[in-house]
Image: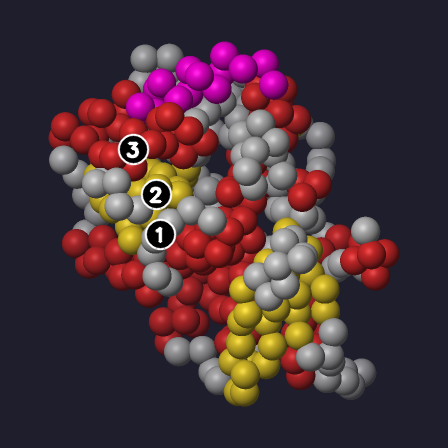
Amino acid sequence: MIETMGTLGLTGSGLQDVLTAAALAPSLHNTQPWSFQVSEHGIELHADPGRQLPVADPTGRELRIACGAALFNLRLALLGQGVKPLVTVLPEPARPDLVAVVRRGGSRRASPEQRRLLDAVPRRHTNRKPFSDSEIPADALHALRRAALDEGAWLHLVTDPRHRTELADLARSAHEIQLADPAFIAELERWTGHGEPRPDGVPATAGGPLPRPNATWVMRDFTRGTGRPDPGFEAEPLIAVLTVHSDGAREEIRAGEALERVLLTATVHGLSASFLSQLVEVPDVRQTLSRMLGGLRPPQVVLRLGHGWPVPGTPRRPYSDLIRTDLQEER
């Protein structure tokens, strides 16, 4: 069978590979809040407000970060197909759910570094299990910082002992504030800890161990209490805070692109990552964290990085569910 060229000059299987790669991006509770509208001349990336978490993410900031991560994968996958992506972010103010339009800007092959990142896309998984206490090499730390800078962001590695203690206390405070909210608990349980097959959310098998109540770095329970007892997390995880110039939709999308580049770079260097999202979801705690970092740029993502054992990926929505129909467009 001979495939004809369609969107951006891609074959049908090429387009499917590109959108499948885009949809392997991380998102809060694996909500996968994106869809794609395709035409001969471009790919539109849309945010799906129906997949926003109104309690944990009332402003949609984390939703836009997730869409930015999907946009980075989309750019990378197009280069893997020999297509130079020409990206316009937030092209129509009257359509705020339209995150970006990607058109063909000519032909270009992925560089060796871009190819390594693209190969890492299906291997990148959020790892909620303990990491080893082995030190992260200096070249990997440099690569992580450079990855953020390449996308117009900054990655702050929290190494000062005083700041680490303060950050651990902030994480605990934010965790306790969220757990005191019945609406937050209900939302968390809707999306995590399930045992039945479904194409989104975090299944109990990917939830990690049950957190210890007295652990230095508090972790969320994604298993609804069914996880194995915590065997003990690493004593000194590498904590990294991703920041951009400011808040606002455009910068949050940029943060998502930088986040995915950092995570894929970590994967290339054999590192694992998980999120300490409570630090940026509780407004007062996020402001305190911002002041700790100097107050110049708002923190968008907090990561725990280290050497972890391989974990399976979370489920993904089928390819047919990613394509935005004309009816959805009208709505």
The quarter of the picture where residue 7 lies is bottom right
What's the mark number on residue 289?
Answer: 3
Question: Would you name the residue on which mark 1 appears?
Answer: 244
Q: Is residue 115 magenta?
A: no
Please name the amino acid that badge 3 sits on. Leu
Looking at this view, is 99 or 175 the one in front? 99
**Mark 3 nearby-residue class (10 Å; few <14, some 14–19, many ≥20):** many
Q: Is residue 242 left or right of residue 221?
A: left
Q: Residue drawn at (56%, 33%), measured in percent from left and top?
A: 58
Q: Residue drawn at (62%, 46%), measured in percent from left and top?
A: 32
Question: Would you name the residue on which mark 2 appears?
Answer: 298
The quarter of the picture where residue 251 lies is bottom left
Please name the amino acid that badge 1 sits on. Val
Q: Residue drawn at (38%, 49%), measured in percent from left and top?
A: 246
* Spot occupied by residue 234 in the image (x, y as percentages of width and height): 27, 30
| CB contact under 8 Å: marks 2 and 1 | yes
Instruction: Work out whether 228 lies above or below 124.
Output: above
Measure the C-alpha gap from mark 3 to mark 1.
14 Å
Earlier-in-chain disc, 3 versus 2: 3
Looking at this view, is 29 or 293 the one in front? 293
Earlier-in-chain disc, 2 versus 1: 1
* Spot occupied by residue 39 in the image (x, y as percentages of width and height): 74, 74
Tag 2, which secondary structure? loop
Taking the view exactly as shown, the residue that stands out farthest to the left is 161
| CB contact under 8 Å: marks 3 and 1 | no
Please name the amino acid that badge 2 sits on. Pro
* Spot occupied by residue 2 in the image (x, y as percentages of width and height): 78, 86
Q: Which residues are magenta?
A: 170-183
The quarter of the picture where residue 167 lies is top left
- Magenta residues: mostly which secondary structure? helix
Tag 1, which secondary structure? loop
